[in-house]
């Protein structure tokens, strides 16, 4: 039963984010999108490297 409650809460949160994102979100400019894409790629790389180092010790 607890699993169903958790799934329901997650579904409601995602639905709320989609509704609010469609209503209040604005499209990103190309340069801002490319800048965030570079930052996200670097952050993912650092996260993967840190997890590998953590598992080694």
Image: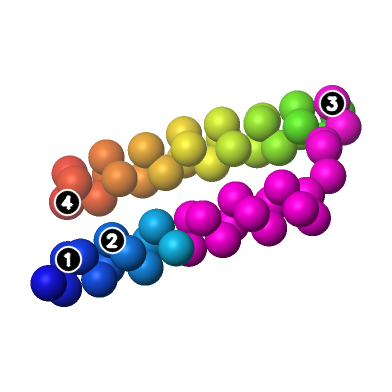
Q: Considering only order in the chain, which callout, 4 or 1, is on the residue closer to the N terminus?
A: 1
- Is 15 magenta? The answer is yes
- The residue carrying mark 2 is 7
- Report the front residue among 54 and 22: 22
Q: Which mark is residue 30?
A: 3
Q: Considering only order in the chain, which callout, 2 or 3, is on the residue closer to the N terminus?
A: 2
- The residue carrying mark 1 is 3
Which quadrant is the N terminus positioned in? bottom left
Residue depth check, mark 3 versus mark 4: number of the one nearer the observer: 3
Q: Residue at x 25, y 71 (%)?
A: 5
Q: Residue at x 36, y 45 (%)?
A: 50
Part of the protein shown in magenta: 13-30
Q: Position of residue 36 (x, y in %)?
A: 71, 37
- Report the front residue among 44 and 14: 14
Mark 3 closeness class: few <14, some 14–19, many ≥20 residues within 10 Å:
few
Please tell me whether mark 3 sits on a helix, a strand or a loop. helix
Q: Considering only order in the chain, which callout, 4 or 3, is on the residue closer to the N terminus?
A: 3
Task: Measure how far apart labels 2 and 4 are at the Cα level.
Answer: 34 Å
Task: Measure how far apart labels 3 and 4 are at the Cα level.
Answer: 41 Å
- The residue carrying mark 4 is 57
């Amino acid at each position: 039963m607890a699993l169903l409650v958790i799934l329901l809460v997650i579904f409601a949160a995602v639905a709320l984010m989609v509704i609010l994102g469609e209503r209040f979100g604005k499209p990103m400019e190309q340069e801002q999108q490319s800048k965030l894409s570079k930052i996200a790629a670097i952050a993912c790389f650092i996260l993967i490297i840190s997890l590998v180092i953590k598992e080694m010790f």
